[in-house]
Structure formats: structure tokens, C-alpha cells
Image (spheres, rainbow, N blue to C red):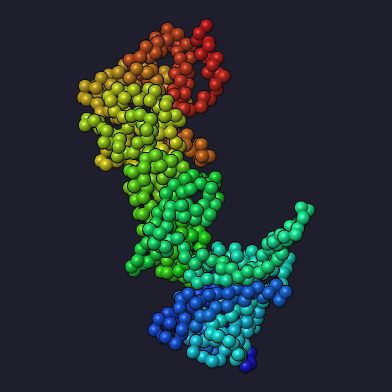
Amino acid sequence: MARKEFKAESKRLLDMMINSIYTHKEIFLREIISNASDAMDKLAYKALTDDQVGMNREDFKINITVNQPARTITVSDNGIGMTEAELEDNLGTIAQSGSLKFKKDMAQEENASEGDLDIIGQFGVGFYSAFMVADQITVMTRAYGSDTGYMWVSNGADGYEITPVNKPGVGTDVIMHIKADTEEEKYGEFLEQYRIQELIKKYSDYIHYPIEMMMNKSRQKPKPEDAGDDYKPEWEDYQELETLNSMVPLWQRPKDEVKQEEYDTFYQDKFNDYRKPLDTIRVSTEGNISYNALLFIPGQAPYDFYTREYEKGLQLYSSGVLIMDKCADLLPEHFRFVKGVVDTPDVSLNISREMLQHTRSLKVIARNLEKKIRAELMKLLKDDREKYQEFWKAFGPQIKFGTYADYGANKDNLKDLLLFASSAGDKLTTLAEYKERMPEDQPFIYYAVGDEASQLGKLPQAERILDKGYEILYLTEDIDQFVMEALREYDTKQLKSINDEDALPETDEEKKSAEEKAEAAKDVLEFLKKTLGDKIKEARVSKILKSHAVCMTSDGPITIEMEKSLKAHGQDMMGFKAERVLELNPDSPVFEALKTAITEDPDKAEKYAEVLYNQALLIAGLPLQDPAGYTDLVCSLMV
């Protein structure tokens, strides 16, 4: 039969598929094997209603043959095969899901009607990926029910030929002649058996038919009976037919038939973790959207987890074939630590299996998985606190980040997963547990932010809260202040910093007393502001100090804790700083000493002001601007 030429549009599309659509050449084998599996599925289905087929599902298999001298890889199946007309259609028509836009765009570009365009299609998309590594492809096929076989040969965009051949048995052989190596590309690697093993394990391990290949192996020869003590072992090469794929994945086996040890081994091998997973989540859903998922919560964070280089995502399979190694869209950012696989027949693909359309199916699966992960973490928190705290140690910062990210969009889903240290004891607490312990008269949920939990209870601001018998959450991580800002309240109870003046509601009598003290201290406060200048926004009589003399608070949207966090993460380039407020206790002896010094010895009063300012910085965990100068200042007051 004469060679058939592809039209110009087909040549362009073939060139695009070979050079643009697929980013990894290695997927060609996945595509050819998937086509073989599809062909066997069709004949296996036909066998259910046609006794003449004479084959059971166990009779189907895929065979791979490598001929290194000839530089060929042959993938053979005993599936339904193709007629001459089907060869024309299957290797010359593009997948409708991906072709529609292409046809429309090309029609506009060429000022032609869509019906005038002859483009490559559905079966042919994956098939033609083989031209990324092969300079010639030969297809030998014989359809079920036909006595005649056909051979399809093509070198790519130049066209193809179809000729009748005598092919024993039904099925299809795809023979790929691998390109010669170049300086840029070593195509010969695909002729190595270890590489073929690797690709099948990676992409086609769960094809539900055996993928067989004659493997070259070596073994030690049996020791001859008359061999002496000086016998040296000899080795021999041999060949053995080996099944290279697992066929049935764990997530498709009945739950009661899979032991936890099998899940652990699968996780450790699949995701290269020497530790067992902390928890395993199995999901199986059937309906409008069907999928199986096998998810794992790791026992520790990967070394690069909290870096930009870390890539989240679940492995996405379509009917047992790996489509994406890391599908980021299946996991929300706050659960990016989860590892696992999702297998669904309902994910829509466009013209390449590598280019997922962001379909409703994918979004529905992602939402369902998010709910399942949260429910499993809540169960872990309730039933195995020790294990949950191990999880929290590894991934707590990620849950906190998710709470305030996107302007707190996910805070309601995550707030019950949060753990905090507190003044109630050494055990970490949830917000729900804190609220359950609250006395009836406690108006707010209190928190303090600092570097060490053991030091937060000693803060001057904490004294009046603790003396009331109220519990304080101790927040020691940079992001904690942002978490509190995002949450604002929990179960109708407002979250309140111990630094806030209204942390303890005042009576009218207390308000009047505070106003009188502020008026009486007016001259002292003005002196402090004049002495310290731009170091502080203002000095004020404190409503949050009880027995301590001084503390540093802030005004405005940026708190001292936020300022420290931004600086720790290198995000203070914009100059965001808290407006510092120096607060003094007018009932303390130190205040009286300062007041007296202002009248009797202004120079000493200025030194007192500097000392108080630096003490307030130290209490707040802020760096001293001149540590040596502060030391000299204190020493000078002792002489």
C-alpha cells in the first residue's frame, strides 16, 4: 500500500506532541503499556458475553522484548487487536477532549472551518509520544475475529504505511526503533533492562495484567562434588522470564486483608522514609466521582519541609497508571505534609496525561480528602494524645501557618487542632480544654507571647492575670501572634493579650483612680518622653502592672511580638516597627525614686530613665541598643 501523508495540521500537532506536550521522555513506555492494557480490557469484556473468545482474565499479559543490537523495544499484548480501519482511526485521530480547542484555535488561525481539519487523536496521543525516543515505529496487529493482520509503519511526521501481514494470534506488537545517541540525549538508556524495570515500577506497577520480560541474570554454579579445597566459585549468565509489576495495589485490596506492616513497608519504600508513618488513612469512595486513596501522616518533617524547595502533592493514578508524581492540587497548603496516592478513573485529561485539567472531579476529591485528614487528626488528638503530640512537634508550625494564611480563611477548620503551652501545667492544651477549665467569671482567653514558656509566667504583665486564678496560654513561636490575630475568639470567648490595658475589666472606681494617678504622674511622664525622645512613642501610667515597676508595650497595628517575628524571618526591610510605650507602676518605690530625682537631681533622673527603658527592653525580649553603655550606666549609679 502506498505511503499516506499526514496533512500540514497533523504534522504540526505531531511535532507539538513530541517536542512540547510531554516534558519527560520516559513516559513513552507508560503510554504504550497503557494502550496494551486498554486493548486487553476490551477483549476481556467481550469474553464475558462471547464464548468464542475462549480466554479468561488470567490469560492476558503484556510482554516486553529488548533487542539491543537492533536497538528495538517491542511491547506485545494479546488484546483485541485492530482492523485496518481501526488502525487508520486509532493512529490518526486526536482525543476529542483535547482536540476541540485545538481545532477551533487552528481553524481561526487558518481561516478554515473545523470540519476541514484532519488532526491526530484519542488513541494516538499516547502512542505518538514514543516518537520522542524512536525514529521509527512498527505496529503489527490482528483484530479479534479477523484472519488478516496488518502492519503500520511510520517514521513520524513524514506519514505512514499500512500493509497486510500474516500475524499469528490476535493482539498487537508495538516495535520501537530507538534513536541513536547524541551528545545531548542518551536514548540508549531505554534499552537497558534496569531502566525498563525502573519505568514500569514507577508508572505502570499497578496495571492489572502481568508485564513480563526475559531478564538477564547471573548466578553461582553448583560446586562440583569432586572439587577440592582450592575450588573457586564460578558464575554463569542465564535468562529468566520475570513479571515486573505488582498488579494489585494496596489501596485496591480489601482493608481486612492488609496488615499495618504492609502499609508501613509501602510508605517507607514509596516515599524514602526510614521511619514508619505516624498514621495511615484509607479512603474508598464510589458514586458520581469514584476514587481510592491511601494517605500517610509522616512521623517527622523532611529536612527541607519548611523551605521553598519542598514540593507538596499526592501521587495521582488513573486506573492504576501513574499520571502525576506530585499533584499539588489534591492537598491544601496546611496539610502539605501528607504523603500518599489517589487512584481515580474520573480525572479528566487533556491531550497529554501529564497536563491535568483542573476539573470539578479533582476539586471534589481534594475537598473530601481535606475533611478526611482533619477528621483523622481530630481522632488522633482525642484517642492517642501522645502520638498527636509527636505529630504536633513535627508539623505544628504548619497547622499554625494554615490558621492565619489567606487572611484566616481556614481558621475554623484548624483551630481545634492547635496545641499550646500554658500556665496550667507542663501538658500542652487545646483551646477547647482551656475553655472548659475557665472560671465562670473569666472574661477572656489570655495569652502571652515570648521566647520561653518558663519565663512568660514571670512577666510583670502576667502577675495580675495569674493572681485572679486565670490561665494564660504561653506562645513561644514567631507565628503565634499572627495566629491570635487571625482567630480573635474561640467559642464566643475573645482572645486577649496580657499586654492589653482592658485585659481585666475595670470598675468605675478603678477607672477614676487610674485617671487620678495619671494626672498626678503627668510631670514624670513628660520628663521620660523628653529624656528618651524618639525611643518611645510615649510614657504612661500602667494599668497592667501590679508589683513590678516597668514594662514595654506597644500602640498601633504592629505589636512588639510581630516586630520580632518579622525581623527573625528577614521581613523587616519595610521598616515595620512597633510604637514603643514605656509603662510605669505609679505605686512602686521605683516610681517615687524617679519622681524625687527629677526634682532634686535631674542628671540622675535622666540616668534612671535610661535604666528603666533598658530594663523594659530586656523584659520584652528586645535587644539593647548599647549593652556596654547600659552596663556602665548601672555601675555609675552604684558608685
Q: Residue at x 53, y 85 (%)?
A: 170
Residue 505: image quadrant is top left
Rendered location of residue 330, percent (x, y): 43, 58
Q: Residue at x 32, y 32 (%)?
A: 446
Residue 133 versus residue 51 in the image, above or below: above
Note whether residue 23 is visible: no
Residue 429: image quadrant is top left
Residue 441: image quadrant is top left
Rendered location of residue 281, percent (x, y): 40, 54
Note whether residue 140 is visible: yes
What number of labels is visible? 0
> Residue at the right extreme?
230
Check the picture and name the quadrant holding the N terminus. Answer: bottom right
Q: In front: 538, or 467?
A: 467
Q: Residue at x 36, y 50 (%)?
A: 376
Q: In front: 198, or 54?
A: 54
Rendered location of residue 271, percent (x, y): 52, 53
Residue 381 falls left or right of residue 535: left
Q: Residue at x 68, y 68 (%)?
A: 238
Rendered location of residue 257, percent (x, y): 40, 59
> Residue at the bottom extreme?
1
Q: In front: 554, or 474?
A: 474
Residue 311 falls left or right of residue 540: right
